[in-house]
Image (spheres, rainbow, N blue to C red):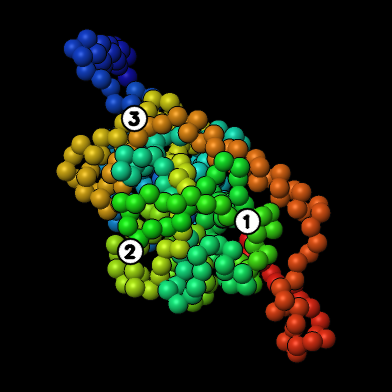
Amino acid sequence: MNWHNVFSIRRVGTLFIVVLLSLGGSIPAALAQGYSSRPHTFVIGGAVAQQDQARTLHHLAGQLGAGAGYPLTILHVDSFDELSEVLRNHPDAIGWSEAGPYVEDAQADGQQLVALPLVNGDARTHGVLLTRKDIPGQHLDDFNGRVFGYADPRSYIGYLVPSHTVEGGRFETAHQDDHHPPVSGVSNAHTGWDQQFEYTLRTGTQERAIVALRTGLVDVVVVDELVWKVAVKRRPVLIDELRVVARYGPYPAPPIVAGSKVPAQIVARLGQALEALSQSESGRRLLNELRVDGFAVRSSADYDPVRQVLSLHQRLRQQARSSAPQWISPRMAAGPSGAGAQPTVPAYIR
C-alpha cells in the first residue's frame, strides 16, 4: 500500500472541508455526526388517525426526514405502551404521541419534545364526547348503564379527562355553531367514574373507537377533535349517524417527540422542518390532509397542567384501590337466570 497516497487523500479531504466551511457552507448533520443513512423509526400512536391518513403520514415522514437530514420510516402501533417501548428500546426513533404518555415518558425515559400541531394558530386541542343520534344525553353522566369505548387507558383526552373533574378545569357544552363560544359547566365525574357504565371497551385506536360507536359495539366515546374532523372528512355520513354531545378542553395537542438519544441539533432540525411545512405548497397540502394549519416548537412547560392532572389522577386511583368495594353491574348481578343467580364480575378491558 502506498501510504503517501493515503495521507495525500486525507489531506485533500480535510482541505476541502476547511474551504467549504470558510465559504459559508455547511456539512449535513447526519454526515457531520457520523450517522448512517438508514431510516430511523417514526412511531405513530393511537392519537392520530392512522388508517385514514396512512398515505399522508408516509409523505410527512418523507418531507420531515429530508428537511432534517434524518431519514424516517413509519411504524404504526396500537397502544401508547407500544409507542413508549419502541422509543425506549430505540432511542434514536421519533414518534407522534399524546399529552399523557409524553409527560410520563419524558420523566421515565428522557423523551424529548419536538413540536406541537397547530389548529387555528393554537397548539391546543379539545376532546369531543360522541354518541349515536338515537341515544339521548347531554352530559357524560347521562350515559349511566351504557357502554363506554376508549382507545387507550393512557390516553389523556380519551380516558383520563372524562374520568374525573380537576379543580380549575372546565367541561364545555358543545355548540352546533363554532362561531359561538362554549358554555362552561362542571362534570361530576369521580374516581370510580367507569362504574356508572355497564362496561368499558378498549378499542386500541381512536379511529376504532368511532367505528365501534357507529356499529353499535359501544354507546359513547371521547376522542381528540382532530381525529373526529379527519373521520368526518373521509366519511361525511358520520354527521348523519353520530353527534357531538360535548367538548372538553382545551388541552395541549398531541406532540411530535424524539427518543432520548436523538441529538439536540437533530431535534432542532426536526422542529424547523415541521415549522417549514406551511411555507411550501406541498407542505400546505400535507397539513390540510392532517387537518392542522402548521406545527410549532414549544416548551415542555406547556404540559405542566397535564403533569398536575396525572399526579392527581394517580393519587385518586391509589385511594380508590385501597378503599372502594368491588363493583358489580346490576345486570351482571342478576345473572343469566335472574334473581338468585350467582353474580359475575364484568371483565374490564383495560
Residue 100 is left or right of residue 195, and the answer is left
Where residue 40 sits in the image (x, y, percent)? 40, 41
Q: Secondary structure at mark 2?
A: helix
Residue for badge 3: 269
In the image, is residue 237 above or below residue 106?
Answer: below
Residue for badge 2: 232
Residue for badge 1: 189
Closer to us: mark 3 or mark 1?
Answer: 1
What amino acid is found at the position of numbered circle 2 in the picture? Val
The answer to whether residue 97 is visible is no
> How far is mark 1 from mark 2, CA to CA?
28 Å
In the image, is residue 18 above or below residue 168?
Answer: above
The answer to whether residue 288 is visible is yes
The residue closer to the viewer here, 181 or 270, is: 181
The quarter holding residue 245 reads bottom left
What amino acid is found at the position of numbered circle 1 in the picture? Ala
Residue 167 is left or right of residue 226, and the answer is right
> How far is mark 3 from mark 1, CA to CA?
42 Å
Identify the mark nearer the N-term, 3 or 2: 2
Where residue 342 sits in the image (x, y, percent)? 81, 82
